[in-house]
Image: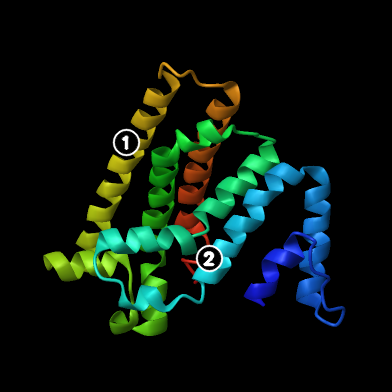
Amino acid sequence: MLKRFMPIAEGKLQPVVTNPYEQILYDLYAKIRAVDEALVGPVFREQAVWAIAQVDQERKHCRGMGALLQLRQKDSAAGWVAALMAYAMDLHLLPSERASVIHIEKAYAYLAIIDNEIESYDKEVAASGTNGVVNLVQMQADDTGCSIAASKRILWVLYRELELEYFELVAKREASVEGCSETLKSYMKGLECVMGGNEVWSGYSERYHPAG
């Protein structure tokens, strides 16, 4: 299915009529493309990256927090969400503008990932046990000898420091001599809103905190 995803989403391959997933995918992206062909390209490219990452076995063999953060940029859907945000907000960035905020997008993605790792840890352990968990919380505990509770607190400190760095990067980009368009300002503000929304949602969502 993954090999067929991109051409179906792009409208270059007809779906199998007996396959409801392909039919829905085809119809959905046909409607999305009809609104804005240019902005929808990054949406289905980032969705494909996310989908492929879901079956990537590399995470099981990942060692070190830095390596896991880099790997999780693909399977966290941070890029997909950013692309959807730009589409929904009708934000057409110039290639040079997009290239100038790579570090900002990385900080945004890392914030989403760290939040997700902290909030999902207990659920992952309940499902797989500590031996089957590849998570920043477990890595922090294993590397430092700290308790799980302490490791979560340490990661929250890291989260807040990255949050400050995000705002510093944004301020620097807005004040740069190359200028900063209103479109780019809106894009960076949008990422900030996504980060804040993700943090609030993750704190109470039954995905991580089952009722009862």
Question: Residue 113 location, x and y as percent?
Answer: 41, 56
Tag 2 and tag 1, C-beta contact below 8 Å: no
Question: Residue 86 location, x and y as percent?
Answer: 63, 40
Q: Quadrant of residue 175?
A: top left
Relative side of 133 to 206, left or right: left
Number of numbered labels in the structure image: 2
Using a 10 Å C-alpha cutoff, classify the residue at mark 2 as few (fewer than 14 neighbours), some (14 to 19) or many (20 or more): few
Q: Quadrant of residue 35?
A: top right
* 127 versus 204 height, above or below: below
Q: Secondary structure at mark 2?
A: loop
Q: Residue furthest right?
A: 17
212 or 64, which is in the foreground?
Answer: 64
Numbered badge on residue 197: none
Kind of residue at badge 1? Glu
Numbered badge on residue 165: 1
Q: Which residue is mark 2?
A: 206
Kind of residue at badge 2? Glu
- Tell us which disc is closer to us: 2 or 1: 1
Q: Secondary structure at mark 1?
A: helix
Using a 10 Å C-alpha cutoff, classify the residue at mark 1 as few (fewer than 14 neighbours), some (14 to 19) or many (20 or more): some
Question: Residue 171 location, x and y as percent?
Answer: 39, 24
